[in-house]
Amino acid sequence: MKKYFFGLIFCAAILTMASCAIKTVKTPASIAPSLKEIALAPGDLKQTSQAENPLKEEYKWPPGSSWSQKGVDLYQAGKLSQAAKIFEEASRVSFDTSASLNAAVIYGELGQNEKVLALLEDTASRSANNPHIQAAFGRAALREKRYDKARGAFEKALSIHPNYEQAAIGLARLQWEMGISSQAIKTLESIIQASPENALAWIYLARIWEKEENWPKAIDAYKKAYVADDASLELRLSLGRIYQKLGNFNDAWRQHTLILNAEPYHREAQSRQKALAKLITEPPEKIIPPLALKEPRPVERAPDYDKHPVLRIGLGSDAGGDPLQLRAIVFRCTGPFEVIDPATGKSLKEGPANEKFLTRLNTQDFFEVSDANQARLLRFNSAIAIRPKDPAKDSLIFYNVRMAQGFSWSEVGDRQYKGKVEIRRQGRGLYLVNEISLEDYLYGVITHEMPSSFPLEALKAQAVIARTHALYIAKHHSHRHQGFDLCDGQHCQVYGGIPAETPRSRQVAQETQGQVLRFKGRLAQTPYASNCGGHTQDSGEVLGWADISYLKGKLDEEVASGGPRMPWQLDLWLKRKPQAYCNFGKDGQAARFRWVRVIPAKEIQEMASRISPIGEIQRILVVGRSKSGHAKEVWVEGKRGRVELNREHRIRKTLGFGSMRSTLFMVETERDEKGNPTEFIFYGAGWGHGVGLCQYGAAGRASKGQSYKQILEHYYDRAQLEKI
C-alpha cells in the first residue's frame, strides 16, 4: 500500500509542475517546499525481486546496425570523440533514442557535461516512461546545478518506479546540496532499509552526519559502508580523521596502520600514524592484535600423500608474488623435529616438541637459531629446512607472520603448515618456503579461494582447476628463480596452510584426486576469478596474456541477453543487478557482483604521481575496452602530463585505494565550482581479472543443478578432464 501511495505523491507533484512555469532556481528556499514534499521515508523503498522487476525488458538489446557497430568499434578502441559524434549524428538522422543515450554516456566520460545535459533532456522528453533515462537526466542536471530540472527528472523516475535506487540516491544528493539535510537523511535511510548493502547510500549518509558534526552517527555510517564493501579502504581514512579529531588516538592509529598495510607509501597515513604513535595509550599489539593460533589444528594428510607430486610454496608473498623480507622468525614444532641442509639433505640438528625457537641475523652476518634461553642451536648462511620427525602427525607453527601485503585484508598472525619448511636468506632478511605434496597443498587452497558454503559441485570444479593451475605454474617456472614453484597469494593462488583446511576442502580434493584439465594433451591454463560480474573476458584482450582458444569471454547468464554492447547498455548494466549465475549472494557479499567506489581525486592523483608527475588531476579516460566491457587502457590526465595504464593489475592498483575489485567499471567525475575534479565515482562489477572460471558463477550454476564437469565445460571450452 505504501508503495502505491508513494507513487501517487509523485504523480501529484508532477501534475503540479505541469500547471505552472518553473524558473531557474536562485535560492535554496525556492525549491525547498517541493523537496520536502517528495522526501523518502524509511519503508518507502522496497526490494524488488528479479521476477517482479517491471523493467526486465531493458535487457533485450536492440539488433546491430551499421552506425551502431561503427560506434561500438570506435568506443572499444578508445576513439571516444569519434564514437560520440557517430552516435550523435545517428540520433539526428534517425531520432534513435539509443543513439542519443550512447552519445551522452561518451560525452560524460569526456567531461562535456553541457552536451550530456542537452542530449539527455531531449531524450527524456521523448521517453517519459523510462525511469533510467529520467534518472540519468536528473544526474546530469544535478552536476550542472540545474536543480529544477534535476528535481523534475528524479520525481518522474520515482513515480514510474518507486524502488529505483539510482533515482533515490540522486534525490538525496539534490536535497543535501540544497541544504535540506534532514530530508536527504530520510531518503538515504529509506534506501538503506530496502538495501542494507548499498554502500553509496551509507557513504552519503556518513558525510551528512560528519558535516553536521554528529560524530557517533558519522562513525557508524562509515563503518556500515565498509561492511557493505570491505575493499573501500578510503573509508578508513575518513574514520581515522574523525577519531583523531575526537582525541580517540588508539582507534585513529589503528585505521591509519591498516591503510599502510595495503598502501605503505600513502603520505597522509604515514604522517598521521607517525604523529599518533606518540599519543596512543596502549601497545600497538593490543590495538591491532595478531591473529593468534590458540591451539594447533590436528594434521590430516591426503591419502598416499608421499606418492603425489611435491610443490614448493613461497609464504608471505605480496601483491606481486614476491616474498616479504622478515627480520626474524619464531617457530615451533608440535612434535620432535630435525634441522637439515636443504642442499644436501644432511641432518644438522634435532629439536624438541613445543619449544619456541628464534631465527635472526647475528653480528657476524650469519643467521642463527636460538631457543627461549638464547642458547644457540646452530647458525647458517643461506638456508635451513625444518622437518617434523613424524610428518603424518606433527606440523610447524610460525608466529606473527604478515600475509597479503598490499591488500586491504593484509594481516599479521600465526601460521601452521604440514610438510617441510625452509628458512631462506634474502639479503639481510629471511623468507619461508613450504615443501608439501600436491594433494595436501590443495586442502589449504580450495576453501581459502572459494567459500566452503558454496555447493559441492562448485567446490569440485575449484579443486580441479586449482590442481591444474598449480601444476601448470610449477611446470613453467614462474617463481623458480626465487627458489619456489608458487607463491601463497593471489599472484598464483591463495594458500593458507592447515588453518585454511575444512572438511569440504578435503572431501572435494579426494573426490577429484588426480583430475586435471588438458587441451590437446597438454595441461590447460586454468585462471579463475572470484566474480566475473556477469561476463568473462577473452584472455587475449588482457595485455601480457596469450590468446587462448578455450579462454574466451562469455556471458554468465542462464538466458542469453546479448550482453552490454553499447555504452548506454554497459552503463545501465553496471548500475543494476541483472540476472546472472554469478549474482549469487548467499554469503551476503553483494559487492563482489556490483560495487561502487567513491575515490577522492587527490588520492588517485597521488597514486598516479608515483608513476609520473602529472600535476593537478583533470580527468580519467578509459581509452580501450574489451568486448566484455573491461577497461583495457586507462589514462589519468593532469595539468602537467598523463599516466597511461594498460596492465590489468596496474589499472586496479592505481585507480583503487588499496586495489579496485576489477577493471569492469565506468567512471563518473564530480567537480567543484571551478571545474576541478573533487572525486571519481566508479560503478563496477565483479572481483578479479574475469578470465576463466567465475567462482560465484560456478556456485550459481551448481545451485541450478549443473555438475562440476558441466561447469568446467562452460568456462574452459573444449578442454578435457583427465587424470594426471
Image (cartoon, helix red, strand yellow):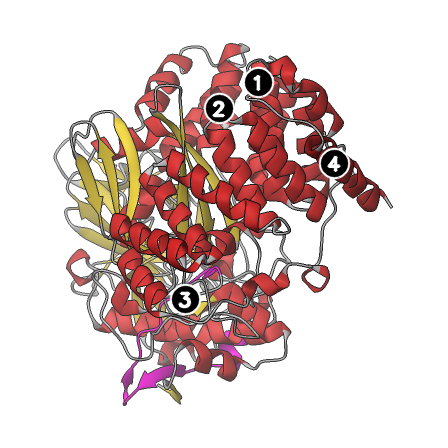
Above or below for 666 versus 282 = below
Q: Position of residue 353 (x, y in %)?
A: 44, 52
Name the amino acid type tagged 2.
Ser
Name the amino acid type tagged 4.
Leu
Q: Earlier in the sequence, mark 4 or mark 1?
A: 4
Residue at 45 percent across and 56 percent down: it is: 95
Name the amino acid type tagged 3.
Thr
**Are there few (<14), some (14-19), or many (20+) residues within 10 Å of tag 2?**
some
**Are there few (<14), some (14-19), or many (20+) residues within 10 Å of tag 3?**
many
Q: Earlier in the sequence, mark 2 or mark 1?
A: 1
What secondary structure is marked by label 1? helix
Q: Which mark is residue 238?
A: 2
Q: What residue sits right under mark 3 in the picture?
A: 536
Name the one closer to the observer, 246 or 82.
Answer: 82
> In whole angstroms, how far apart are the C-alphas of marks 1 and 3?
39 Å
> In whole angstroms, how far apart are the C-alphas of marks 4 and 1?
37 Å
What secondary structure is marked by label 3? loop
From the viewer's perspective, is 559 left or right of 461? right
Q: Quadrant of the C terminus?
A: bottom left
**Are there few (<14), some (14-19), or many (20+) residues within 10 Å of tag 1?**
some
> In whole angstroms, how far apart are the C-alphas of marks 2 and 1?
10 Å
Labels 2 and 4 touching (C-beta < 8 A)? no
